[in-house]
Amino acid sequence: MDYDVIVLGAGAAGLMAAATAGQAGARVLLLDHADRPGKKILISGGGRCNFTNTGTEAGCFLSENPHFCKSALARYTQWDFLALIERHRIAWHEKTLGQLFCDGSARQVVAMLVDECSRGAVEIRLGTGIGDIGHGDGLFRVAGATAPRMVVATGGPSIPKMGATGIAYRIAARFGVPVVTPRPALVPFTLGPDAKAFRDISGVSCPVTARVGPTSFDEAALFTHRGLSGPAILQVSSFWKAGDPVVLTLVENAMEMLREARRKAPRSRLRAALSEHLPNRLAEVLADRIGLEQELANSSDAELERVARHLTHLTFHPTGTEGYAKAEVTAGGISTDALSSRTMEAKAVRGLYFIGEAVDVTGWLGGYNFQWAWSSGWAAGSACAAPLTG
């Protein structure tokens, strides 16, 4: 036996698991095929890493078992990670909706995690392919090394240009661990020819309420040359299934707004009224789409109600999403039914753990997925430092 635990994947979850286990006394080997650790961390948050969210709670995560994430999130919280950030004297700031960012660079977070691994005497091997995984006599054999425990922290297939793959699912299949069908999440939508006018105003954004089914988010939407993006759209995309409409509310109290516009500027037309509340290019497209030609003074309440309906229920039927190439995370993954919520260990395979994005736990946009990486990594790392039993 060369090590107590082998961690596969030097991303957020893997670095946290390795550091936690190492500092608790375990001999840890951390492997990654990439040439440097934390590559997704480095590009996150516009290079400043939205490392957690003050509002983190179980309700901010999607999973076939919505209760699974509670244990890990409760035992290693956003405040615990923030304390780690502050111990390393990394300056940070809070943006909207509880999102915490580095003042400087995401490189600081990676350096912090690597330093934490060093404090735990973790051996890090980069540029190392995993290859075939052997298992027998209570030991896992990977890349020429052996250990009684193996932590899979290889993420999901989102952002393949960063080296992301679905290897976690192949490892799960190798050991008979079930997988919930993966899909792109926090991802832009594509729109068809019927929405060409909206694709033609690429770059326009505005605050909206975006809805998919009963789920809604109040943030910005962005019109793109392919369809819809922006925070509100990315949020609802995690709940979207093929065929679902996406409904935007552009003006919350639309009827009151239209009546007020008719009262104040009766000679004006719809485009001018809309431009008071929406970007000009969007107002123009909407006015053309709605087709109310006369002055507002000559528009009845019934006609204004029709306009208001467009403003509160602007409905799109996406043709799909932009896929894993543009997805910030992957929904689905290793079935939580097969894992211990306390340790992340596979119930049927002693010593095998799955953490982070590889697992069927997906957070909202805004630092939640990083917190799941820290919490699940801490849970597995702590478990891997305890004596083997059973």
Image: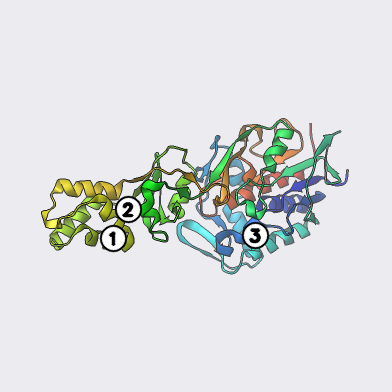
Q: Position of residue 214 (x, y in %)?
A: 39, 39
User: Residue 122 at what x, y percent from top left?
Assistant: 79, 55
Kind of residue at disc 3:
Leu
Q: Earlier in the sequence, mark 2 or mark 1?
A: 2
Is residue 291 found left or right of 322 in the rendered image?
left
- Asked if the residues shown at circle 3 and circle 1 are in contact, with their CB atoms under 8 angstroms apart, the answer is no
Checking the image for residue 250, the label placed there is 2
User: Real-space Cα distance between discs 3 and 1?
Assistant: 43 Å
Screen quadrant of the C terminus: top right
What residue is shown at x 13% (from left), y 62% (from top)? 267
> In this view of the protein, can residue 277 be seen by the observer?
yes
Q: Give SS at disc 2.
A: loop
| Residue for badge 3 | 84
Instruction: State which quarter of the image contains the N terminus.
Output: top right
**CB atoms at circles 2 and 1 under 8 Å apart?**
yes
User: In the image, is residue 120 above or below residue 105?
Assistant: above
Mark 2 or 3, closer to the camera: 2
Front residue of 10/289: it is 289
Rendered residue at 25%/50% (across/down): 290
Q: Which residue is more in the foreground, 322 or 8?
A: 322
The label number, if any, that marks residue 48 in the structure image: none
303 or 196, which is in the foreground?
196
Identity of the amino acid at label 2? Leu
Kind of element beneath mark 3: helix
Dot 2 crowding, Cα within 10 Å, few <14, some 14–19, many 20+: many
Could you tell me the amino acid type at mark 1? His
Q: Give the percent coordinates (x, y) of residue 129.
A: 78, 49
- At label 3, counting other C-alpha atoms closer than 10 Å, the crowd grade (few under 14, some 14-19, many 20 or more) is some
* Among numbered discs 3 and 1, the one appearing first in the sequence: 3
Identify the residue under disc 1: 277
Q: Is residue 208 visible?
A: no
